[in-house]
Image (tube, rainbow, N blue to C red):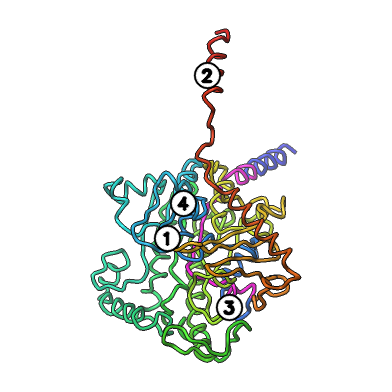
Amino acid sequence: MKKLFLLTSALCSFALTVSAQKPDVVVILTDQWSPRYTSWDNPQVKTPHLDQIAKEGMIFDACYTTSPVCMPARVSLITGLYPHNHGHALWGNASGYYVRAETAPMFRDMQQAGYTTAQIGKLHWNSGPEWKREYPTPAEYHKALGLDVVKDIAGPPDNITDRGLYGKYLSGLGLLDGVAKDIRRRYVLWEFEPRASLASVEQYHDSFTTGQAVDFIKAQPKDKPLCLVVSLHSPHPPLDAPGEYATMYDPEKLTLPANVPESFKRESFNVDHATMKKLLANYLGKISLVDHCTGRLVTALKERGTWDNTLVAFTADHGEMMGAHGMLTKGRFYEESARVPLVVRWPAQVKPGRSKAPVQMMDVYPTLVEAAGGKTTPGRFARSLMPIATGKRERIRPVAISEIGDTPPLRIMVRDVRYKYWADESREYLYDLDADPLEMTDLSADPAHQGTMNRMREQLLLQLRSSQVNFAEGYKSKVKRVREEEASRQSPK
């Protein structure tokens, strides 16, 4: 009996220790991933590692980027603010912009919760040397952001003088000249030309980034949790899936959504369905390569011994039109561009399933902090997903919004649980996503939907009014200050 008691006590103690242990946190941030091409919605997509993560986690089917272009969205993630708060220049990938450390507290919040922090891969918060006005070196700037480890690996090199980490790697292999010239040719002619990379799978950009991330995981002490953002460039163009991933998908066996026209013109290219399937085949090859990279990360975490207590968030900065409505690339409010995949997985904490609640990609930030047992810096408009992921609430916000533009009136979108509304420089749009998920029928001019139009306009206005940075927070009038001072003087010591 005594031995049984001691064994039971030991097991209980072990269980308490495991349950109290902070999770490792890994964010897999991809670039330009259309939500149409996730395996849980599209059986054509081959992503077994991500399938397993999605099976063990919660899929958020109505997650939207704050802006359908790289930099503003990525800035929103680390600031927890909308573009109209963080003031990204032109709301695009503009030059002369950088994130001020005091406005971007995500990594500092994780540090304060006891984590070693790192981002490896594409950062893309800054677009010029302006940060040097305040910080003599990149290391000091990254330290101010709360990052312990940074490996800034920009997109694939298009310049033979590239001195970035990946450029140096290719140079050491004797490949930089060829790869850079190939990438530049694609950008000059057409970045959507579907043709295999000159780099092999092992030499490819995302494989290199993943290798750096795996090395980081292996180097971390097991008695301290890690917070790692792995930022991969794929499936962003150019369409240069490497090696076997360039031929993994047979274009003739692929089907296109009904909102892809039989033919359309982009730049000087006429794109028909046969051509579009070739583009899609290479794009899906890059998606499957990301899945392969994900498998390497999972293996490293299993070897570390923390996989069963690792929170994984898989998402993208924005989507890709991939032929929908006769368009390519991003910058639009259609589902393919403004909506992004999002899965949150944390065993025994997150309930597996799917949520239709409108959420924002930047909500990943306070989700990580809450899971870490930390506190999110006040003044953020991002919201933790944990109440939904744990089954305590169905929604954390009434609507999700997205915004982009460089000339007034700026374009802005709002999505509730059923409808999507947006306005651009010339007109308004309305879609019933329950009845019309491919957004084939614009209801904005339908008299029967004018009530819905008015309601969506009001929801957008309310959201904008409710998400303004309150620079007067804590303000006290002079009269109130004087009265408080007088009361303090008269109070007994």
Dot 2: element: helix
Instruction: Kindly identify which residue carries mark 2.
Output: 482
Measuring 38% from the left and 44% from the top, which residue is drawn there?
144
Q: Which numbered disc flags the more N-terminal residue, 2 or 4?
A: 4
* Picture residue at 69% right of the left edge, 75% below the top: 436
Amino acid under disc 4? His
Tell me the CA gap for discs 4 and 1.
Answer: 11 Å
Mark closer to the observer (4, 3)? 4
Q: Which mark's residue is nearer the viewer, 2 or 3? A: 2
Q: Which mark sits nearer the N-terminus, 3 or 1? A: 3
Residue 424 screen position, x and y as percent: 54, 67
Q: Quadrant of the N terminus?
A: top right
| 437 relative position to 87: left or right | right
Q: CA distance from mark 4 to mark 3?
A: 36 Å
Q: Is residue 149 above or below residue 20?
A: below
Q: Residues within 10 Å of mark 2 (few under 14, many from 20)?
A: few
